[in-house]
Amino acid sequence: MIKLPPSIHKFGYTRQEVLDIIRPLKIHHKRFWKEFGVNTVSVHPKTGESLLYGVDIITAIRCCQGNRDKNLYEWD
């Protein structure tokens, strides 16, 4: 089971937080972003920064670790 650390934001994780999560897992960032693909995100109201949902991050990590693509039921 993959458990993400708490995010600094209420509604999701910043790009830098994601990179900090995948680095110790030895997942290359290009591979991660390929598996993350196009997903719904929230936007921070003050900074305009994209906030990525934890469930989508976990799915991308599972795909990277399992060396597979997303299954149809895993898409938003």
Image (spheres, helix red, strand yellow):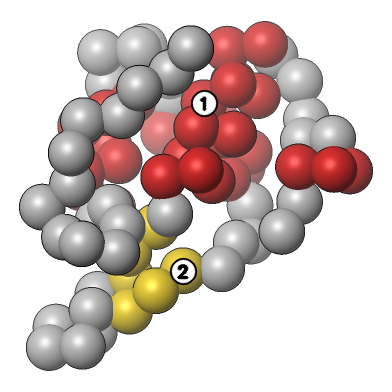
- Given the current orientation, which residue lies at the most extreme bottom position? 46
Q: Nearer the viewer, residue 4 or 39?
A: 4
| Quadrant in the picture for the C terminus | bottom right
Judge left or right: residue 73 versus residue 20. right
Left-right relation of 70 to 7:
right
Residue at disc 2, secondary structure? strand
* x and y, in percent, of residue 43 in the image: 33, 79
Say few, some or many: other residues with alpha carbon within 10 Å of mark 2 (under 14 / 14 to 19 / 20 or more): some
What residue is shown with label 1? 61
* Residue 33 can be seen, yes or no: no
Q: Is residue 47 above or below residue 20?
A: below
* Amino acid type of the residue tagged 2 in the rendering: Val
Give the x, y percent position of residue 48: 24, 84
Query: Which comes before the other along the chain, label 2 or label 1?
Result: 2
Q: Which residue is mark 2?
A: 41
- In the rendered image, the vertical position of residue 65 relative to residue 48, given as above or below: above
The furthest residue to the right = 72
**Quarter where residue 51 is shown:** bottom left
Q: Is residue 32 above or below residue 73?
A: above
Q: Cα distance, mark 2 to mark 1?
A: 17 Å
